[in-house]
Image (spheres, coloured by chain):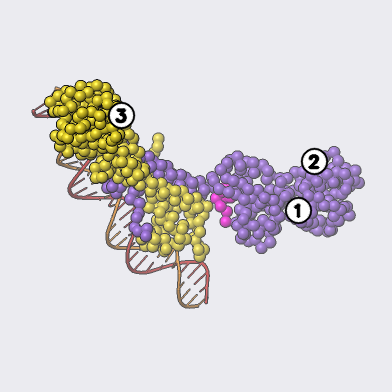
Chain colours: A yellow, B purple, C red, D orange
Amino acid sequence: MPADERLPVSLRTMEQFVAVAEERHFHRAAERLNMSQPPLTNAIRKLEEALGATLIQRGNRVLGLTAAGAVFLDEARETLRQAGRAVTAARDMAAGRTGVVRLGYVGSALYGRLPDVVREFRATHPKVRLELREATTAAQVAALREGTQDVGVLIPPLANAEDIGRTPFDSDRLCMAIPNDHPLSGRPDVTLADMADEPFILWPLVEGRGFHLQVIRLCADAGFVPEVAQEAYGMHAVLSLVAVGAGVSVVPESMSSFRGDRISYRPLPGSAPGFDLVLAGRDLSPAARRFVRSAGQA
Amino acid sequence: MPADERLPVSLRTMEQFVAVAEERHFHRAAERLNMSQPPLTNAIRKLEEALGATLIQRGNRVLGLTAAGAVFLDEARETLRQAGRAVTAARDMAAGRTGVVRLGYVGSALYGRLPDVVREFRATHPKVRLELREATTAAQVAALREGTQDVGVLIPPLANAEDIGRTPFDSDRLCMAIPNDHPLSGRPDVTLADMADEPFILWPLVEGRGFHLQVIRLCADAGFVPEVAQEAYGMHAVLSLVAVGAGVSVVPESMSSFRGDRISYRPLPGSAPGFDLVLAGRDLSPAARRFVRSAGQA
DNA sequence: CACAGACGATACATAAAAAATATTGTGGAC
DNA sequence: GTCCACAATATTTTTTATGTATCGTCTGTG
């Protein structure tokens, strides 16, 4: 039976004792504690009573500590430090200065702002663990609902996801990539429809679902279904195939500096500058909220 | 400027939070804390306010912890443990269950109860460090006054030492030691006066001052000044010399089983059974007080 | 869909504890 | 011996913690 044994001291009392022990002077200690001397004397007396131990050697001109007082001073200091740690730990966690952010992203996000955003966040939030995991949009929505992921970088539209908050993240504007030795590359104004009969290099449907579908959708809007000549995973892989003339493709504009000697990049005239990658989350933890804020404002 | 930053929590509040976090139920937690539910709800709310952090996830049927709540639970538990350590450390020290006892003793004390007393005290007080140091009575009195020694086993009388408390410790009754082949050993009733003209084996004045003087004093009472034939430090050394016929001596009765084949021990008829070894101390620390109590009552 | 029950929040009252002010002892220094 | 510095008391005031009564809300159930 654990009985009624409450702790007979408070942190305040410990603070008071430490002050007296350090100053060796009730008046100065009281001043430091922003209080007057009498209640301090009282508090120390009650502390000694509660402990059943004399802590302070009075009587002489200058007051000293008993052996019990000395050990209690040490332990009380440690207790106060630990209490401070408890407070800052909770505050840091609540403010998002510490914690974990499990971030999912679709593969194509790697060719936009995401790498910079991650680097920046890690630099400004060294005590937040940022876990990265590549996943399709659908998988991320499920993970967000299960609570196994905090934030996702994914490609709208999101079906049946009214409960998930969204923030614009990256305008992943696309362009056409045409081999330099291809007839189309000489023509001034190429449209997507011009590529209806060209062989396409695309991401595999299973591994690069989001990006694959995005391209298919664009083609559908242009009135055709692209003929997939070859699949390749990763923008550089796709473009390397374009460079050797294996076909044409549609890639993010941010790739347009890659193999400029062998590939000509042409804007997609019809595509508006809308946002194609969003940050999504549900019940954001403070750290996750910080990530979204940090990612959104850059 | 350290400003006015007091700790915004008390140990009591931490106790309350831990109870709620563990029970996941305000009513049960309140019961465990021997209080009613409303003030508990209030206390938790004020805690969250003070920390600027939500700790407990309400709303759902069963309440859970936020990330901040989880870390605060850990840290609060540790704080409570540490506070408990502070209390018991002070109490143990004040009760003499821990601490240090610096014990001085005159060399001759080793031939009486002291070894047993030390063994017993060490067994019953494992967390008290007992430091032993051999020293003359005068040196011990000085050390007691300086505060470099806590308790002493020494030989009265003590000059100018009214401030030092004394407890009888050991009746170090003395007897004469005479070689078996000495003429005196045949006589039935030998008195100390009979040994006035015999060569004495004694402890050196410098190293064995207390015991040396005690014997000199006895001889003076018997009306003579002993002729010191040889000095030897330690009872066994003295008696070995007696055994080979180098002289006579006066030793504690507890030695009378040593070399019984060569030495005959005779009681000192005049010496009353007074206490010749006392425990002395000044401003006894709790641990020292325990030692004196333990040593005195055996 | 209404209803009961469980549970946490709120409002108000009361008791306990902490702190402030004024004053009194007390021991050491000149 | 007198003064001074400092801690201890005494008493009042304020703050804080706790208790009682009650309400609102969500959940599972008939």
Res A246 seen here? yes
Q: Which residue is mark 3?
A: A240
User: Residue type at mark 1?
Assistant: Gly
Q: Which residues are magenta?
A: B283-290
Residue occupying the point 25% across, 23% down = A205
Q: Which mark is residue A41?
A: none
Determine whether the residue tagged by mark 2 lies in a helix, strand or loop. Answer: loop
Determine whether the residue tagged by mark 3 lies in a helix, strand or loop. Answer: helix
Q: Nearer the viewer, mark 3 or mark 2?
A: 3
Q: Which mark is residue B258?
A: 2
Q: Position of residue B260 (x, y in %)?
A: 82, 39
Q: Quadrant of the N terminus of chain A?
A: top left
Q: Is residue A218 above or below residue B82?
A: above
Q: Is residue A102 above or below residue B135?
A: above
Mark pair 1, 2: CA separation: 20 Å
Residue occupying the point 33% across, 46% down = A124
Residue B199 part of the magenta segment: no
User: Residue type at mark 2?
Assistant: Phe
Mark pair 3, 2: CA separation: 104 Å
Residue B285 part of the magenta segment: yes
Dot 1 and dot 2 residues touching (CB under 8 Å): no
